[in-house]
Amino acid sequence: MAATSFKEVFDKLNQGVVGYVVILLHVVAGSYLVYSQPRSNLAFLVFISSLLSLYFFRADNRFKILVGMLLALVIIPVIGVRNIFYLEVIFQISVFAALSLGLNIVVGFTGLLNLGYVAFYAVGAYLWAFFGSQQFYVLNYAPGTQPPDLPFLLPGDAFYLFLLVAVIIAAITGILLGLPVMRLKGDYLAIVTLGFGEVIRVLANNLDKPINLTNGPQGITPIQRPTMPEWVVDLFNSLFSGVIGHDVKLADMYNVMFYFFALLVIIAIIFVTKRLDDSKIGRAWTAVREDEIAAVAQGIPIVRMKLLAFAVGASFAGLMGVLLAASRTFISPESFNFMQSIGVLSMVILGGIGSIPGVILGAAVLTILNLQVLQGFSLYLNDLRQSDAVIPVINFAWKDLSTQLDPAKYQKLLFGLILIIMMIFRPEGLIPAKRRKRDVSVDETK
Amino acid sequence: MALLEMANITKTFGGLKAISDVTFSLEKGRIVSIIGPNGAGKTTFFNTLTGIYRPDTGTIKFNGKSLVGLRTDQIAACGIARTFQNIRLFADMTVIENIMVGMHVHLKQSPLQTLLRLPGFNREEKEAEVKALRLMQYVGLNNVENELAKNLPYGAQRRLEIARALAADPQLLLLDEPAAGMNPQETEDIIKLFRDIRDNMGITILLIEHDMRVVMNISEDICVMDYGEKIAQGSPAEIRNNTKVIEAYLGRGAVAGQHEEKLQ
């Protein structure tokens, strides 16, 4: 009841110019706060939440696109270069949003619980890691014994080609891993996919022998990035060095570039997801989720539809894998452990299973929680431990507090708590999936 | 040539013969019922016909084409649509989407058209929406196109299931206990609907039903099953007086009693 009345009040408020005013105020206030206090986590939260205002408040679509473009193309790069950590957070949000959107197709639309989703991410990452590094010439050396000054197999600009190759290879992997599990449902499917996810990680860990494909637990480095044209740096500097306060270095510029790549990939993924969802394919996916027997009786080839869902979901992860490998220049099997799969699944569940804006919000909330809020608390606690402050009333000195009490270590506990709370109070997620309302009338055609 | 010809169909589950040596044929444009006591093998018969089970022996021909060994979705695409004994709608999809899923095999949109929203895609979607709305109104549902299927009352859900089946433009419509749980008025309405589907859409109807008012009212031909065997087939009047049928439903004593009545 409380939720509906809140919605009514919000709808009443959210009319006319109110939307424009709130959006503008929020964006300006957020930008000003982060600009004036580039180290404050709180300022960053205010800033990043302006995207929520942009989504929820009513305004003309052209106005929203304009503000969104201003944020994405100008404000975020400028603020990100002033504090590169923010850019990293936003990049991570984009990566996880893309993974969540991919998993959402499998779990949300088609109803196949996949606990090994990170495997496809690993496939994409290792694909570019192998072809975009010297690994090809290290095949016959044990890890760590290769001679220095090996050439690179491919130029860095092959990265662009591999974005496409990764989509195809990851999709094929999705189909290959999907084929043997098509007869399984629910829990059984979850367990087998969990196993597959681990298999891929263990393979990455152990394929340093007999031939050294993955360099084992040490991971592959350096992985090439696409070349940055000189004029891009110059253009960026001539436009923004005034507001930033200093000239941008090449390393920082790479972060900006990968942020833009991630943004483009996200937009492409949303585009593809939306269009597939609102078509015969999307309806078939949802029908399979709702009732397989009824779906197959409507002539829907369920195995093919499930494999398609696996393939599309996997391709998004593969694409992001290539981006990750290039942006980090280093990958190791540890980046693709089971917790990553669980994390992405938590984002989907928290945001709203089957809901595109929902899973993006879920990815943003958990990433920020993980990278900023918990870390922030840990730092704050550390500061208190260093000081002579005592907790009032109980007279407990902060410096006696156990160092085990470190919020950053309680990430899993918090994820678990969030999922339990969501299941009790809002099982459909933060932004629940809605079916599209269609405006049809019969006399339209005749 | 009959629309559907099934010959010597047998289906066993372990030691249980769910259907044994059933031969059955169905002429185009008829309304035929399959009746029989609980466990007689009626639903197994449907499931074998639609490919959910594969018969152990026997042949199934639809329009002269063999259906044995085809997948359920391929059989559906041949023009056989069905409804289920316990309603199976896509609960979290809207009414109109449920019907549009029924059109799946007829929609030609390619993935490329879907992604690029080419004019062909938009036209086809629009036409599908209009057709779905027409079907929805045809089965007697009004102004619920954007309602979730699970929010509809029971009778409306039954109707929606029929609309979804009709959306595939089937030649043969299989109805598994379509009148179950309906009150007399609803039953009467749905009988009218079935007649109309046959008369105006030219769709052959094969139904399983327990409600004898429905069966005797609507059927032109009745097939009776008991313990997996077909024990009789004929017009309602013939079936009503068939001793084997009475035996199956009421036991041997009933038949004996009838004989005594006749003797007196």
Image (cartoon, coloured by chain):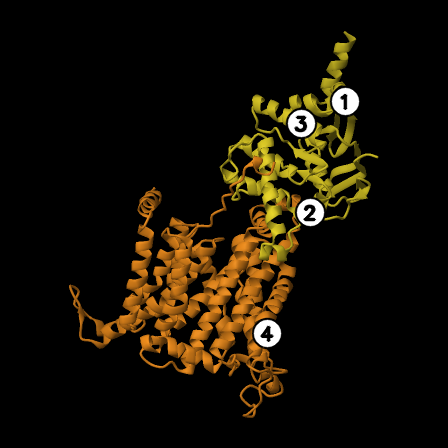
Residue B196 — which label?
3
Residue A96, x across and y down, in percent:
46, 65
Q: Which mark is in front, 1 or 2?
A: 2
Residue B73 — which label?
2
Q: Specify the quadrant of the image occupied by residue A363.
A: bottom left
Residue at left offset 69%, top offset 29%: B200
The residue labelled by disc 4 is A161
Closest to the observer, A420 or B201: B201
Q: Which mark is in front, 4 or 2?
A: 4
**Could you tell me if the residues under marks 4 and 2 are in contact, i.e. CB atoms within 8 Å?**
no
Q: Chain of mark 4?
A: A
Residue B113, x across and y down, in percent:
62, 55
SS state under label 2? helix
Q: Quadrant of the N terminus of chain A?
A: top left
Question: In this rendering, do the residues under marks 2 and 3 share a single chain?
Answer: yes
Residue at left offset 63%, top offset 45%: A293
The first of marks 3 and 1 along the sequence is 3
For residue B51, above or below residue A269 = above
Q: Chain of mark 2?
A: B
**Cα distance in 3D space between marks 3 and 1:** 20 Å
Q: Specify the quadrant of the image occupied by residue A343.
A: bottom left
The residue labelled by disc 1 is B235
Q: Colour of chain A?
A: orange
**Could you tell me if the residues under marks 4 and 3 are in contact, i.e. CB atoms within 8 Å?**
no
